[in-house]
Amino acid sequence: MKKLLLKNINQLATFKGKKAKHGKEMSDIYLLNDCCVLIEDEKIADIFPSQKLALYADKDVEIVDCSGKLVTAGYVDCHTHFVFAGDRSDEFNMRLNGIPYMEIMAKGGGIVKTVDATRKASEETLIKLSLSRIKKALSYGVTTLEAKSGYGLDTETELKQLRVANKLNNLQPVEVVSTFMGAHAVPKDFSSEKYINYLIDEMLPAVTKENLADFCDCFCEKGVFDAAQCKKILTAAKLYGLKPKIHAEEINRIGGADLACELGAISCEHLLKITDKDINRLGKSETIGVILPATAFSLKENYAPARKMIDADCALAVASDFNPGSCNTQSIPLIIALSNIYCNMTIAETLCALTINAACAIDRGGSRGTVEVGKNADLIIHNLSSLNELNYNFATNSVEKVIKKGKVVFEKDY
């Protein structure tokens, strides 16, 4: 039985439990000072005060000296689109010059441009590109992340994206959780209704036959799929065993958040245009709201009303939304800074949103997201002494070491 012992932890900052934290619960953080964590066979076996360290003396234990540092659970990036090919840097600069995103899409840019590049890319090329992106995510402390498809919009390429996402789990340590998002846009050679039927009749059976995804997501947006169309897709997906997610109220408020609550979706994501009525319903539901502050920053949009949502008892997660168009960043430090400074979240709430709530938003709260006995040993050792320094050193990467399932898988090379 392999054992790893983290000693000389100045502060361990974590939450407890397997379920998402709502409202005030997002501030119920446990701060343990001067402690140690014992790991056995990929799981956390014990957490104890440093003065009891001598009781755990064992020549078979590998020691990691945290040297008075902060330790947290590994981050969970619960909303990304990182399996893609191509470049859209021109669009970023077009938006900075005042051209709206939806106008860019109407001219053949946006998602459709990435679709063209991803269709042409081989599986081997997508794996190579994706491995580079995961390596960067790991350097920011991400130990689990979601990968949405949606840059195929045909059966062959959607399956290719999802196969790549699944193969990545055998090629590197970060766990990749897959979401089928064929309903990301309407391809140029289809009407919306014809494409929805194709998605339901051909794509969904193919995805589930190969067991390639846990979730199904839809882009509920004006000019893409309306709420009724998303309901049709997600209802069909549930029959195939895929849990529903929804891109909701990003550019226009058209009922996506309301639909998420109606369907019992595991999450609704973006929420820039969410209304007070939607917030109140979300706060009474088990659906997790996922906010993506770096996307609002990139699009120069108002941020999701996180403070209002937390005060209304919503469960919130925070994620990167890393994608080639609207949010080309993987920087968790930037996301922490935006969450604190512009979304008015506290550092405790932000840590909750990046760990246990994010884990629950991809149905992994039972095994990770907190530092507790019995959970996966997914941990970050920060080059900081306390949680208060995490946002004080804003937009600066504090990650010194990352442990995934009891193994040191990243160490900063100073």
Image: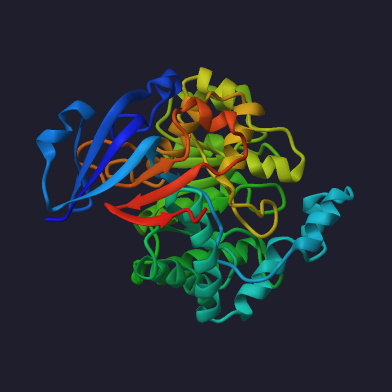
Rendering coords of residue 91 (x, y %): 79, 59
Q: Is residue 133 visible?
A: yes
Q: Is residue 202 visible?
A: no
Looking at the picture, tell me which residue is in the foreground, 232 or 240.
Answer: 240
Q: Residue at x 17, y 34 (%)?
A: 53
Q: How is the image coloured?
A: rainbow
Q: Is residue 125 above or below residue 24?
A: below
Residue 57 location, quadrant: top left
Q: Residue furthest right?
A: 97
Residue 385 location, quadrant: top left
Looking at the picture, tell me which residue is in the foreground, 156 or 160.
Answer: 160
**Image quadrant where one finds the N terminus:** bottom left
What is the count of numbered marks? 0
Q: Residue at x 24, y 47 (%)?
A: 63
Q: Is residue 189 above or below residue 375?
A: below
Rendering coords of residue 111 (x, y %): 68, 62
Left or right: 70, with 187 as reference point: left
Q: Is residue 40 above or below residue 279?
A: below
Looking at the picture, tell me which residue is in the foreground, 340 or 276.
Answer: 340
Q: Residue at x 33, y 47 (%)?
A: 378
Rendering coords of residue 367 (x, y %): 27, 45
Rendering coords of residue 224 (x, y %): 67, 54
Q: Residue at x 67, y 36 (%)?
A: 253
